[in-house]
Image (cartoon, rainbow, N blue to C red):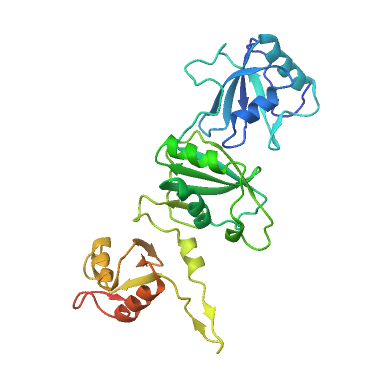
Amino acid sequence: MSTSSQPQFRYTQTPSKVLHLRNLPWECMEEELVELGKPFGKIVNTKINVGPNRNQAFVEFADLNQAISMVSYYASSSEPAQIRGKTVYIQYSNRHEIVNNKSLGDVPGNVLLVTIEGVEAGDVSIDVIHLVFSAFGFVHKIATFEKAAGFQALIQFTDAETASAARNALDGRSIPRYLLPQHVGSCHLRISYSAHTDLNIKFQSHRSRDYTNPYLPVNPTAIEGLMQPIVGPDGKKKEPESNVLLASIENMQYAVTVDVLHTVFSAFGTVQKIAMFEKNGGTQALVQYPDVTTAALAKESLEGHCIYDGGYCLQ
């Protein structure tokens, strides 16, 4: 019997062929639940990613005795049930079947869960991921994160058809060698469908992007990473050349908007994106051009100049 402070089982419940699993890894997949239950019998239905933290699930065995067998085994085993190294807590469900749910299978959705095997976080940039998956259609959003399973990404497409095309083409394949750092020998993509339908991206950063919203604020930590000084041969700091300008707006006596900045900076070329934010008590903006040359021209022309007479300056 388990003697831990948080027992894996509750013994007061009536046995059911539906088991309730708690403390699952985030984005746990049906295949992992089937694998856990395989020694005890056939799982015929599941309901995954439930609960406030999306870390619970229900699994339904074909036969009541199979569910009892699984509960009994882990109740007397010194080794807890585990998925990806996390202890899974199992109890009988008060329901006796899973209804109004898709039958077990890899049901297509518009969001893919991609595990990039053989790399560390930072080896594969979000821009590389975007480049690879954009070959199949417009990528709306990307969120990357590190889990016990490895470096993972959620990639949102317009619809399930586009996501399916990307999955069918890339699952089990490797990211092209020329897009990987030299120290990475090879990497493999393991792709499944996510239960998500619309990712909630709060900031543009090196970990997450929303390609549908150019006005989404940029994470300040991402900005600081971009603005690391470069030291020239003479030992003096010089700014790295980039197609993105950081504009500090001072002496503000008029309202400043994205539209005003767009008008001013568009005089020098196509402005792709503008992101405004507050930092250190002042207003700043990131302005993205298609190339470094256009950005350099705009910087040289506008730096230190006023937009309005007596208004505010761009540094």
Q: Residue, x 28% and y 61% (percent of image)?
A: 258
Left or right, residue 222 beside residue 17: left
Q: Residue, x 45% and y 45% (percent of image)?
A: 136
Q: Residue, x 35% and y 71% (percent of image)?
A: 247
Name the one closer to the observer, 196 or 271.
271
- Which quadrant would the C terminus be assigned to in this image? bottom left
Above or below: residue 195 compared with residue 12: below
- The image position of residue 152, as x and y in percent, is 58, 46
- Which quadrant would the N terminus be assigned to in this image? top right
Name the one closer to the observer, 155 or 314.
155
Left or right, residue 172 beside residue 160: right
Name the one closer to the observer, 136 or 310.
136
Name the one closer to the observer, 25 or 5.
25
- The image position of residue 131, as x and y in percent, is 49, 54
- The image position of residue 262, as x and y in percent, is 27, 65
Above or below: residue 144 compared with residue 303: above
Left or right, residue 14 beside residue 267: right
Above or below: residue 155 compared with residue 294: above
Residue 4 appears in which quarter of the rendering?
top right
Q: Residue, x 20% and y 78% (percent of image)?
A: 310
Q: Is residue 81 visible?
A: yes
* Count of number-bearing discs: 0
Q: Is residue 8 visible?
A: no
